[in-house]
Image (spheres, rainbow, N blue to C red):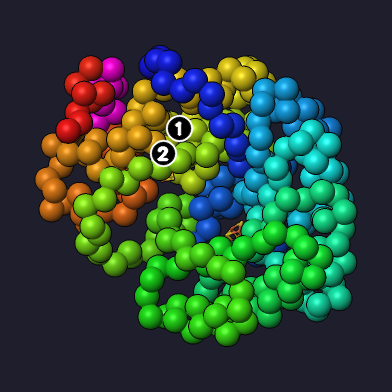
Amino acid sequence: MLGTSTTMNPIRQIAFGYSTKCNIRCGHCVASDDSIPHGKMTLERAMAIIEQMARCNVTGISFTAGEPLIFFEDMTRLVKLCHEKDIYSRVVTNCFWAKTSEQADDTVSALTRSGLSQLRLSFSRWHQEHIRRENVVNAANSCQKHGLDYFISFVTDFSRQDDSLEQFLRDNNLKFFPEPVIYLGRAQEFDPPRIFTDYHPNTCNMNPYLSPELDMFACCDGGDQFKETEFFLLGNLRDYGIDELFKRKENNVLFHLIRTMGLTNIASYLGLKANEIVQYRKCELCEKLFNSTENLNTLEKAATSDLLNWKR
Ligand code: SF4
Ligand code: SF4
């Protein structure tokens, strides 16, 4: 592991995978991939980890991975603990529980009473093959009614097929943010249309992810997907403390460069032509650079010398 004192007062936030189990099967899913066994940690273990995270200055926890609210009682306990420890909490959900406005109210009011900070509602043409789109409206309206912060994560491949879904969100005056499909997990089987992006830096915040098996990864999207190099794997909580695993992320020069210098300049340093780089989506470029032993060896050798100085 490369070491440098790149971050003095890091912000510590994490995607918390209490379970990868889900009640639906979206065609684009990264988190609940069939190649990954669907695990769940015990409630006692999760509570102990959150206690440790509070002692290690973690300020935000996003409950994600599968569908957290299929374990509703557990989730309210975990959210309540976050609230007691002054940790910002978010739950990411597919809204299966919001079939009627009354049912949505029951769930949202219980989460609000537990101290939840924010609900993130997933919406896409893949989710909506299984969940009625009206569920998302019911959930969003209940959040507004109970004063719970929310937003809709509108996952899209930016094709015309998604126009009517986007219009539906606009017609219902809902707060939404488009997000690109990540072509990892099940979406690896898609045939992504080629794109030409602007020559933007492709920096990435890199929130870490804790799996139900207690593996901690430096990235919550590509985390356990870069199988050839295991580039993002920080270690397992059975072997190392939370603080140690966060420090591994914070002190890794390549992770630091992804956050600050961006993938585009790293790719250019590695020899990719500019007209090739603009054909990559961000996570695809990341995989090209770091899921190859050869590229990773080159970049690790250069990380503390040439690469750190590869700036204008
Ligand atoms: S709701 Fe989320 S976790 Fe479940 S299958 Fe869909 S994308 Fe995956
Ligand atoms: S660009 Fe890399 S670090 Fe960022 S989300 Fe994608 S896979 Fe993770």
Cβ at disc 2 under 8 Å from ligand 2: yes
The stretch drawn in magenta includes residue 299: yes
- Residue range in magenta is 295-304
Residue 69 occupies which quadrant of the picture? bottom right
Cβ at disc 1 under 8 Å from ligand 2: yes
Q: Which of 235 and 276 lies nearest the eye of the viewer?
A: 276
Q: Residue at x 13, y 48 (%)?
A: 274
Of marks 2 and 1, which one's residue comes earlier in the chain?
Answer: 2
For ligand 1, the image quadrant comes to: bottom right
Q: Which of 2 and 211 lies nearest the eye of the viewer?
A: 2
Image quadrant in which the C terminus is located: top left
Which mark is drawn over residue 258? none
Numbered disc 1: secondary structure:
loop
Residue 80 occupies which quadrant of the picture? top right
Q: Residue at x 51, y 53 (%)?
A: 30
Question: Answer yes or no: do the residues labelled 2 and 1 have beta carbons within 8 Å?
Answer: yes
Magenta stretch: dominant SS?
helix
Q: Which residue position is annotated with label 1?
A: 232
x, y (%) of residue 56?
Answer: 67, 23
Q: Residues within 10 Å of mark 1 (few under 14, many from 20)?
A: many
Q: Is residue 96 visible?
A: no
**289 lies left or right of 10:** left
Type of amino acid at the residue the image marks with label 2: Phe
x, y (%) of residue 301?
Answer: 25, 18
Q: Which residue position is annotated with label 2?
A: 226
**63 lies left or right of 98:** left
x, y (%) of residue 209?
Answer: 57, 38
Q: Nearer the viewer, mark 2 or mark 1?
A: 1
Q: Residue at x 38, y 71 (%)?
A: 158
